């Protein structure tokens, strides 16, 4: 009897939803509201946020959708802030030391891979609101890499930092590179590399932002260390691009 009641209740709910959708078919804003609140579809929430981005939803209900999006994106259920690709940047920076090099590494302060050593890097900033797809325009990938380098290591090279000619190492995506990746959202990183001039001054570092520690590490040690994410592969690829053995 209980199963019959539950089935009838579900049938009634679906019937109410269909009637509401027909009633509000001419109003995208109200249709989105019905689909989000009654059906609880994540896809509808994504569509609603995209509608706000394109200016297709009325202003008085845009705030409501934003609140719903904020609860979902960046939560335990969905750790990323936006659907689809979530662009990041990483940078391999070497400092000459005798006949070899030191490489700048940071120890991660937060999950995933908390406590692991990694390359400086982070998310590529965008002006798109939380819950909307990433949109280019706020900063270039190179600018993002240098910004993350400053934020996580406080490396102060003055005018030299701005004049550094970063070399593109490659773009990396998939293959389980980030534990947070899922079918709905995933990371994709652009990696750069550079060798500081032998006479570079003020290369002292201090951890900041998402880094618990920042340290110049002998290259031979870093190559043997198990780095976070796919940073071991990025480091190996960077050494080839830089022609460093």
Image (cartoon, rainbow, N blue to C red):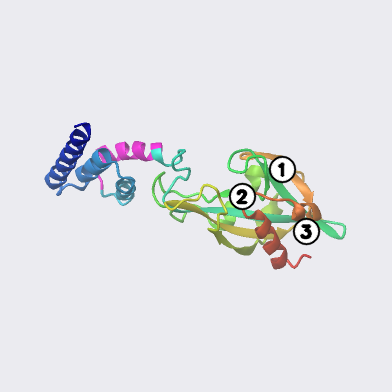
State which region is magenta.
57-71
> In this rendering, would 178 be left or right of 208?
left
Residue at (30, 45) in percent of width and height? 41
Residue 157 visible within the image: no
Measure how far apart labels 1 and 2 are at the Cα level: 12 Å
Q: Which mark is residue 214?
A: 1
Measure how far apart labels 2 and 3 are at the Cα level: 21 Å
- Residue 49 placed where, x, y %? 33, 46
Q: Is residue 69 magenta?
A: yes
The earlier-in-sequence mark between 1 and 3 is: 3
Q: Are marks 1 and 3 in contact (CB under 8 Å)?
A: no
Question: Compared to 5, does 170 lie above or below?
Answer: below
Q: For the residue carrying disc 2, how many other residues have a C-alpha within 10 Å: few (<14), some (14-19), or many (20+)?
A: many
Query: Closer to the camera, 63 or 220?
Result: 220
Q: Nearer the viewer, mark 1 or mark 3?
A: 1
Q: Nearer the viewer, mark 2 or mark 3?
A: 2
> In this rendering, would 143 be left or right of 102?
left
The earlier-in-sequence mark between 1 and 2 is: 2
The earlier-in-sequence mark between 2 and 3 is: 2
- Location of the N terminus by quadrant is top left
Q: Main secondary structure of the magenta part?
A: helix
- Which image quadrant is residue 212 in? top right
Q: Are marks 1 and 2 in contact (CB under 8 Å)?
A: no
- Residue 110 placed where, x, y %? 60, 38
Residue 151 visible within the image: yes
Residue matched to label 3: 197
Query: Closer to the camera, 39 or 120?
Result: 39
- Which image quadrant is residue 238 in? bottom right
Measure how far apart labels 1 and 3 are at the Cα level: 20 Å
Residue matched to label 2: 121
Helix, strand or loop for disc 2: strand
């Amino acid at each position: 009897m209980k199963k019959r009641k539950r089935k009838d209740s579900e049938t009634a709910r679906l019937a109410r939803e269909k009637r509401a959708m027909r009633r509000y078919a001419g109003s995208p804003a109200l249709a989105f509201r019905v689909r989000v609140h009654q059906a609880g579809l994540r896809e509808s929430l994504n569509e609603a946020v995209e509608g706000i981005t394109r200016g297709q939803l009325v202003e008085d209900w845009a705030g409501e959708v934003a609140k719903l999006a904020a609860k979902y994106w960046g939560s335990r259920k969905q750790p990323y802030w936006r659907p689809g690709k979530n662009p990041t940047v990483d940078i391999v920076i070497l400092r000459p030391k005798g006949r070899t090099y030191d490489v700048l590494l940071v120890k991660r302060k937060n999950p995933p891979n908390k406590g692991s050593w990694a390359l400086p890097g982070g998310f590529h900033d965008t002006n798109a609101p939380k819950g909307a797809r990433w949109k280019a325009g706020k900063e270039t990938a190179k600018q993002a890499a240098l910004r993350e380098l400053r934020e996580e290591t406080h490396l102060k090279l003055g005018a030299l930092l701005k004049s550094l000619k970063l070399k593109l190492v490659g773009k990396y995506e998939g293959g389980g590179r980030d534990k947070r990746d899922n079918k709905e959202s995933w990371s994709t990183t652009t990696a750069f590399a550079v060798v500081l001039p032998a006479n570079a001054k003020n290369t002292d570092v201090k951890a900041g932002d998402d880094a618990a520690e920042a340290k110049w590490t002998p290259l031979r040690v870093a190559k043997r260390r198990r780095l976070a994410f796919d940073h071991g592969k990025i480091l190996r690829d960077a050494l080839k691009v830089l022609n460093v053995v």
